[in-house]
Amino acid sequence: MLALDTNVILRYLVGDDAKQQQLAFELIDAYSGQTGSLLLNNIVLCELVWVLQSGYQYSEEQIADLLHNLLLVPELVFENYELIADSILTYKDQGGDLADILISKTNQYLGATHTISFDKQACKKGYFTSPEAIEKKKP
């Protein structure tokens, strides 16, 4: 299995650099039919979203559709398919920041009851909980 960095998957998808896009196509096409041969880890996915939003002005809907389509590619493997699929669904339905959603869902998966944050937007969406909303327990 090979792991793809954000810039490789980005060139493959966006094609803003013809030479790099061709190399990305050749690499990915070489693994066609080899299920689970190319890894996209969670950090790469979050970085991909950030670059598409900030650098290419993709809408949340466009990004959610693109991410959903990546999940359907049999050659791609993800750190935790169910977790990222659920995070993408939440991103598509509720919007926000995929990184925040993934942090929240990962922490829940690992047993945390809350993810404490000062991020007011993420708290408002219910992904995180503000420190003020948590009952403090003394040791």
Image: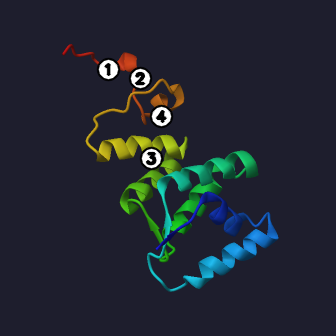
Quarter of the figure with the C terminus: top left
Mark 4 or mark 2: name the one nearer the start of the chain.
4
Callout 4: SS: helix
Q: Position of residue 65 (x, y in %)?
A: 58, 61
> Is residue 7 placed above or below 37 in the rendered structure?
above
Disc 2 residue type?
Answer: Ser
Label drawn at residue 130: 2
The residue carrying pointer 1 sits among few (fewer than 14), some (14 to 19) or many (20 or more) residues within 10 Å by Cα, namely few
Label drawn at residue 134: 1
Q: Residue at position x 71%, y 45% from top?
A: 54
Q: CA distance from mark 1 to mark 4?
A: 16 Å
The residue carrying pointer 3 sits among few (fewer than 14), some (14 to 19) or many (20 or more) residues within 10 Å by Cα, namely many
Task: Name which quarter of the figure residue 96 lies in.
Answer: top right
Q: Pick the residue in front: 99 or 94.
A: 99
Disc 1 residue type?
Answer: Ile
Residue bearing mark 4:
125
Q: CA distance from mark 4 to mark 2?
A: 11 Å
Residue bearing mark 3:
102
Q: CA distance from mark 3 to mark 2?
A: 17 Å
> Is residue 117 placed above or below 21 in the rendered structure?
above
Q: Position of residue 62 (x, y in %)?
A: 64, 57
Q: How many discs mark residues in the rendered view?
A: 4
Q: Pick the residue in front: 55 or 57.
A: 55
Q: Residue at position x 52%, y 46% from top?
A: 98
Label drawn at residue 13: none
